[in-house]
Image (cartoon, rainbow, N blue to C red):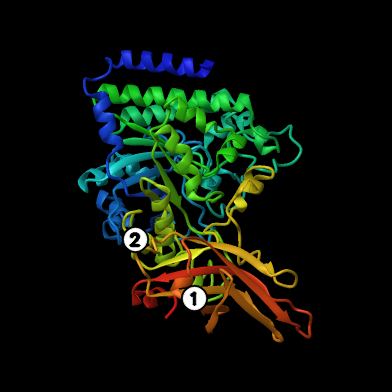
Amino acid sequence: METNFSRRFALCACVALAAAGGVWADEAADRKAALARKRDVMYYATGYDPCYWPKGTPYSQAAFWNIRLNALLKTPAPIDTLVYAPVGAFAHLSAKIPSATMPTAQPSEESNWMRGVRNAIPDFVKAGTDPLKEAIAWARKNKKEFIAALPVNMSEHGAKEKGKAVVWDNYFWSPWKDRHPGDLMADAGDAGHPPYASPTAVDYGKASVRTAFAAVAKEIAEGYDIDGLLIDYMTVPTIFRTVAWGEKAGTKEWQALTDMMARIRASVNAAGAKRGRPILLAVRVPDSLPFCRNIGIDLQAWMDQKLVDFIVSGGPMELSPYSHMAEITKKSGIPFYPCFDESGIWVGNDSGYQNDDERPTLRRHAPETFRARLQEAAVAGAAGVMYHNPYHWIRYGLHCVCGGPKDVATANKRYHVCYRNNGTAGAVLKDGQKLATREQLLSGAPYDLKGAPAKFGVYVWDDLKKHTPRRVIVTTEASVPSGIQTTVTVNGRAVKLIRKIAGSQQYELPVSALKYGRNEVIVKATGKNRRGRTATLGNIAIDVIYTEAQKKEGGAK
């Protein structure tokens, strides 16, 4: 049955297209060609670089390109699409330069973090340009598809300290929030902070917020030479005040957000019709349909009403296997792209690195780990992948941009129980972690082997009938006190310990014992420590090795 908001969308779209002069002759064919464009690898850059400009470096287009963009030409795999979200506005971006919502203040000289940088946005304004325009110029020169991104909320914009030294990003505070204090997740009448959101995030339950956001999207579509627009619900997956205070979204929230998406779709279509070239509309959303609905995203309605051209799933958390979103989008004929973020799993300086995400032999940031994720994406039927802001990743950075789903069939891979901490789910939705279907095994929350043995599945997606690896290594990250021993079985087969290194243990698994899909790994502890300490397990990984290059990547020898 047709809903009120679907009728509103149809009406808005017709009016917008009529105002733009109608649909151009080859609109359907051009849109199909734009959607079919090669985007095996997308790179999402959050554009804070102009606000962290090195002191002593004059502004120029060349200097801006050299900060990050030119490095994208040297990644291990070519990047097809640049997704760029320059800083500004209440939610991240403003098309208008100069704009009252763009951050033109300078960071505090009292901030240790910010002493070596300055805010160069005023320099862009003085030169008659802006970061979005310059990023597009880079993409055009280097023949990259360009998609502008609009995150709906940003944690960096969530604090304001009057009369205090600005420690980090507080100088991004938007005057828009001062003018609309009632449109935030908390106001003066609330007792305390909302448990599932920053109190200064904007509330899309308010019509004024939705109107302002849709207006920025319209500015972008009309004023810039973009190939697409991505509405990002994942950078900070906080949308509605009701959810921030512990409720689940319902019909009211779904309809409000769907209506906003319909307005944005109409603006994008009208701008495309005016220039005679389509502008694609995409979204980045949680990788769980139930989670989407509970925070206010009626993704199925968006697909049914053709409000989006493609979907990017996941990022700050991974709740479901890639096959979950693949099945949902396939029914609607919409391509999907899993998003690869950093692991978000920090355990200290175990191996001498700041913010070390794992032991040296079990890095989730290593290229071979990202190849495993690529292989899973390939099996699921993903159209490609998106790497989210890898320039700032600890340790490997751009070296992890190692290809698309079609590039890794016989490359060395490292499969983990999980690749991301899904704790963000519980931080933005009450009981949100209960919706996760991926198992979790983390160094920061290890499994205590005192009681029952640990039993986890490590999924391997290599085509073992077509390609035979040279070796298979199983690695556990286990803290084993004196007097205690651990044994490991894989698919019911005991495996032989070959070495211990940096708090982890490596075992040889016969290639013939490896299974496609789920490999059950059981870790058991026996014995007793005199001080009563118990063994704990923080991670399990399976390395599928085709070449000796694995040695150079920090894995099994």
Quadrant location of residue 451?
A: bottom right
Side (left or right) of 289 relative to 37: right
Residue shown at 53% from the left, 41% from the top: 173
Q: Nearer the viewer, residue 557 or 517?
A: 517
Which mark sits nearer the N-terminus, 1 or 2? 2
Disc 1 vs disc 2: Cβ atoms closer than 8 Å? Answer: no
In the image, residue 489 sits, relative to residue 393, either above or below, namely below
Q: To which residue does mark 2 refer? A: 408
Closer to viewer: mark 1 or mark 2: 1
x, y percentage for residue 222?
A: 32, 27
Q: To which residue does mark 1 refer? A: 509
Residue shown at 51% from the left, 31% from the top: 300
Q: Quadrant of the C terminus?
A: bottom left
Element assignment for label 1: loop
Tag shown at residue 201: none
x, y percentage for residue 205?
A: 60, 28
* Three-letter code, disc 2: Val
| Residue 43 visible in this rendered orientation of the protein | yes
Element assignment for label 2: loop
x, y percentage for residue 316?
A: 53, 50
x, y percentage for residue 532?
A: 79, 80
